[in-house]
Amino acid sequence: MQETAAPVYPTPKSGASLLISFRVQDKLVLIVGGNVLAASRAFAALEAGSKVVVLVKGGAETACEELRWRAKQEQITLADLDLLPDSTPSPGDVETFEAYLRASQKPISLVCVTDTVIASSSPSSAPQRSRSSALALYKSCQSRSIPINITDMPDLCDFTFTATHRFIDAESGEPSGLQVGVTTNGEGCRLAGRVRREIVGLLPRDVGSAVRNVGKLRNFAKGVDGEEATEEVTSGEVNEENGISTPNAPVPQRTRNTESLLESQRRRMKWVAQVSEYWPISRLASMTDEEMRELLNGEGGWENKLVSSSAESDPSGQSRPSGAVVPSQHSLPLIPPPSHPSSSRGRILLVGSGPGHPSLLTIATHTALTKHAQLVLSDKLVPAAVLALIPPEVEVRIAKKFPGNAEGAQNEMMEAAVEAARSGVTVVRLKQGDPMVYGRAGEEVLYFRAHGFEPIVIPGLSSALVAPAFAGIPVTQRGVAESFIVCTGVGRQGKEVKLPGYERSRTLLILMGVARLPQVLKALLTDEPDQKSRNGPAYPENLPIAIIERASMPDQRVIASTLRNVERALEGAGEQRPPGMIVVGWSVLALEGKGDVSVLDQGGDDEERVGRWLGEKSWKIRDGLDVDWDHL
């Protein structure tokens, strides 16, 4: 076995800020200055739940109107620097500031100095603070380990403020828990505000409601909704962020009768992570408490909502009686629309949505979604960009196919399709990629046929071939790969599968194997006579391998290395981006740089070949999609 190459990790480049979300609930924030910027800082601190004290030279007489109003409302404490205990007539008021810090009964978390900006032309405004005075305040806070921000003097700042936006909960109209912040690290403060607006404009209006609902879902999953919380829950062990780099890691199938409370909480938190990762924002925003409990319990479908007010109107503008059923976008009404009388027979279309990018949909799939579908039963991996093409009046339901619940969710979707079709509805069973390539379409065809429906299968582009193409990897290439084989990394109900043995001229494509990478590598590399997880010779450690995540989507990422180093490469790349697939073989490096299509020629040193490809590094990472795809 050859010596393992030393890992090469990303080289840090200075110039960034450490972006953190700082909690100041019930803590003291001290603001020096009485201008509108001070009022803005005070409001931000109040929204974070802190106690705010504003020190202004001249007190309320020189403070802006907003600060005076908040002081009258007792939201903040407004104090005159000239009248504080131990104050002195010093024009720099540094001694007064020092005295206040010494006398403070409550620890000070942050200090914001805002009176260093150009003073207002109003005769009542406080004078602008000099740099020497600001430097003295900075040193005073430094000696007490109190973080301080001094406006317009970046060298005297322990922290800076981002251009922030707090989203509104579309349902309640109240501010939500979702905030975004943008910083240019001093290279374009005005531009940061514009970038923030651009980001906010791209996100759905109901994203704040989605965050609120996911918060509820987390509480339900942890058992805070009536069940006794285990010690692991209260200590934070049970959390969907735990092990976040492998959101698709397998979990045991659910066992209703033997599952302990802790096992149940862990499984449900795994489902919360899956919902957060895959479901469209609009679906998360529309969840009811009842639907959340059904999701976590793995029971039932999405129920229709009842009207609570007799004055409510349906989309046509006509009033509905109290208690009438209101169709949810994601409910499953089985009453056929007027154009399909109850005597008519529905049909089922088994449709492939391709790898993800909407422009890769076939015309047949696009037509099925936009013109024929009355009910769409979608797998969780179908991206929101594809679901957005579905007309708003069409019912959409997302499969609850999460780890530990795959079999039950699969059966539920098939049953729902048959029941809807029997009522005269055209059902689109929407699956990612091609439904016949590890899409379980065969099971569904046989099930639907047994229940009296012969589904129409509409193929889609399979990620097995599309993803390598987007990564610049040819699955076949003269001089490199004469054939390819597609296999899965996991068998039925999570069982391991037997992988094919090594052939130099063949590309191996593994779907659904990234979450099981250690087991896959062991199966490929182990060179033992009783090898049971591989059918054929072992693979060389220096063989190129690529992990392709989110193929064809804007956040596509390709991690390329060797079998020897790929596990460390994946760990070093940070949070995983499911779905992903694996490509193993010499085709991975065939088109890199000047290309290498001499792999099948006689002679040549493979270590040298890999060295030319990777250079001094142990792996390569390519992030993002070619911008030209935005216009296709």
Image: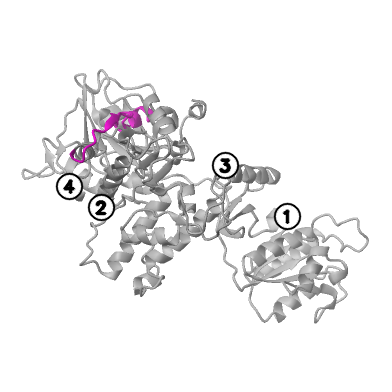
- Give the mark nearest the N terminus, 2 or 1: 1
Residue 210 in sight: yes
Q: Does the stretch in magenta take in 219?
A: no
Q: Is residue 242 found left or right of 204 in the rendered image?
A: left
x and y percentages locating residue 96 in the rendered image: 79, 75
Foreground residue, 41 or 90? Answer: 41
Instruction: Give the mark nearer the N terminus: 3 vs 1.
Output: 1
| Disc 1 + disc 4, Cβ < 8 Å | no
> In the rendering, which numbered label is found on residue 408?
2
Q: Residue furthest right?
A: 123
Percent coordinates x, y for residue 455 in the rendering: 26, 33
Q: Within the magenta stretch, is there residue 455?
A: yes
Q: Are marks 2 and 3 in contact (CB under 8 Å)?
A: no
Label ID, residue 447 = none
- Kind of residue indicated by mark 2: Gly
Question: Mark 2 Cα within 10 Å, few/some/many (few <14, many 20+)?
Answer: some
User: Looking at the image, can residue 243 be seen?
Assistant: no
Nearer the camera: disc 3 or disc 1: 3
Identify which amino acid the numbered label 3 is placed on: Leu
C-alpha gap between disc 2 and disc 3? 35 Å
The magenta region covers: 450-471
